């Protein structure tokens, strides 16, 4: 808020605008009488003409200010309401008499005309308006020219290298000496400069007022040695440093809006945003239908595209299955043929054994061997009988 002047006493009311207006009118009448008595001036001047015009001008209407005690609901709006005085303490609003304490005054955007050393106008001052302090703004053609092999970018000579080396060595030696001195000075007292002079002991000579004790001891003067008390490096801080939060940042850029218009039912329906439906969390316990959940998932908005690789995969599987079936069928047929061949070979071997056993049995009995069956082969029963006879004949021969 603005500054508030001390409260004015109720008994001593300030002179009102009516009294000021009366004094101004009396002054103007006296000036007019004086001009009527004096002779006319020989030469006129602009200032005198302006003064005469001001005297001849009609009196300005003075704004009426309510007296003290009757200012309820009255608020000072302009500087004329303060009448070149302070603020009104009984009016509980922010007041700025004579614009004192008022913040946010609009600064002018007019840039003052400046020139350089040669007298040329510096037009690049406009580009630096509104920029932060210390920001480099490139506005001249020389800033765009590429820097060549200048003296600033050239390698230093031997003298500069030696000078820089000596300065660096001296700085490092000063740091090392300071560390060594700190190690030999556990009390932390300064050893160099004015601080060391202030920290050096001070001797004060004085004469005690009690001369009787001084006469008894024989000491008429005393010397006091004043030294600084050593500081404990582990002592906690005596003052609490409160960190004050920073001020508010700069306001954001204004957003330009279109003029307001009346909303229709269609606009309200378009701006109705449905609540978020999650597929994992339901903290509020809403009962969401499946169609709404799928609609919120966004699957209906996606275009379904079937890749050609599915057809290629199905065709490859069909071809592989057909080739596997053909291989299995050919393998079964081959196994069946091999089994038939093995069976025929076994039957032929058994037939030969049966014929041999029959011949041996007929030779032992002196009979002719029986003719083979008309079918060209022996059956299982005949084979069993022949085998039994062969076994009997073999046993009888042994």
Image (cartoon, grey):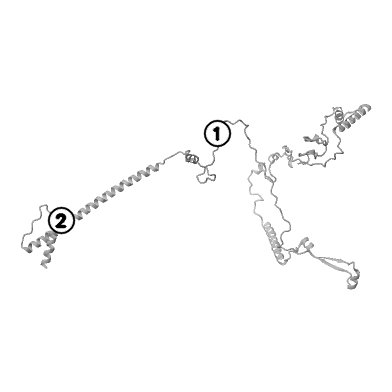
Label 1: element kind: helix
Say the numbered circle drawn on residue 47. Answer: none
Q: Residue shown at 16%/58% (left/top)?
A: 350
Q: Is residue 209 left or right of residue 348?
A: right
Up/down of 212 relative to 171, above or below? below
* Mark 2 Cα shell of 10 Å, populated few (<14), some (14-19), many (≥20): few
- Give the mark nearer the N terminus: 2 vs 1: 1
Up/down of 45 relative to 99, above or below? above
Near-viewer residue (116 or 276): 276
Near-viewer residue (395 or 54): 395
Label 2: element kind: helix
Q: Residue shown at 18%/54% (left/top)?
A: 344
Residue 228: horizontal and vertical position, in percent? 78, 64
Label 2 vs label 1: CA separation?
96 Å
* Mark 1 Cα shell of 10 Å, populated few (<14), some (14-19), many (≥20): few
Q: Quadrant of the C terminus?
A: bottom left
Q: Is residue 209 left or right of residue 325?
A: right
Up/down of 292 relative to 152, above or below? above
Judging by the rendered image, the residue that carries numbered circle 1 is: 269
Marker count (numbered): 2
Residue 269: horizontal and vertical position, in percent? 55, 33
Up/down of 389 relative to 125, above or below? below
Judging by the rendered image, the residue that carries numbered circle 2 is: 380
Near-viewer residue (386 or 140): 386
């Amino acid at each position: 808020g603005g500054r508030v002047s001390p409260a004015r006493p109720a008994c001593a009311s300030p002179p009102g605008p009516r009294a000021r207006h009366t004094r101004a009118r009396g002054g103007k009448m006296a000036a007019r009488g004086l001009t009527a008595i004096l002779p006319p001036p020989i030469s006129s001047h602009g200032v005198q003409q302006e003064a005469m015009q001001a005297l001849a001008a009609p009196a300005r209407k003075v704004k009426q200010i309510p007296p003290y005690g009757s200012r309820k609901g009255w608020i000072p709006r302009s500087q004329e309401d303060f009448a070149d005085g302070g603020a009104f303490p009984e009016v509980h609003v922010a007041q700025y008499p004579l614009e004192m304490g008022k913040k946010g005054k609009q600064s002018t955007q007019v840039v003052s005309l400046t020139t350089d050393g040669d007298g040329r106008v510096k037009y690049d001052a406009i580009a630096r308006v509104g920029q932060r302090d210390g920001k480099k703004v490139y506005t001249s053609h020389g800033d765009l020219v590429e820097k060549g092999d200048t003296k600033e970018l050239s390698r230093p000579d031997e003298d500069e290298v030696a000078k820089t080396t000596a300065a660096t060595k001296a700085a490092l030696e000063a740091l090392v000496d300071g560390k060594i001195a700190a190690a030999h000075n556990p009390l932390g007292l300064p050893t160099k400069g004015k601080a060391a002079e202030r920290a050096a002991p001070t001797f004060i000579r004085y004469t005690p007022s009690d001369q009787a004790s001084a006469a008894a001891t024989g000491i008429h003067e005393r010397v006091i040695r004043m030294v600084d008390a050593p500081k404990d490096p582990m002592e906690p801080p005596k003052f609490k440093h409160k960190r004050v939060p920073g001020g508010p940042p700069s306001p954001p850029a204004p957003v330009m809006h279109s003029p307001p218009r009346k909303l229709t039912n269609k606009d309200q329906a378009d701006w109705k945003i449905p609540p978020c439906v999650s597929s994992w969390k339901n903290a509020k316990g809403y009962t969401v239908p499946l169609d709404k959940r799928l609609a919120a998932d966004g699957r209906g908005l996606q275009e379904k595209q079937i890749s050609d690789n599915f057809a290629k995969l199905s065709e490859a599987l069909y071809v592989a299955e057909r080739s596997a079936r053909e291989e299995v069928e050919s393998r079964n047929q081959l196994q069946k043929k091999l089994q038939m061949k093995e069976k025929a070979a076994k039957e032929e071997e058994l037939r030969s054994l049966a014929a041999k056993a029959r011949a041996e049995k007929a030779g032992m009995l002196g009979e002719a061997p029986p003719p083979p069956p008309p079918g060209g082969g022996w059956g299982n029963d005949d084979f069993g009988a022949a085998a039994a006879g062969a076994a009997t004949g073999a046993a009888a021969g042994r």
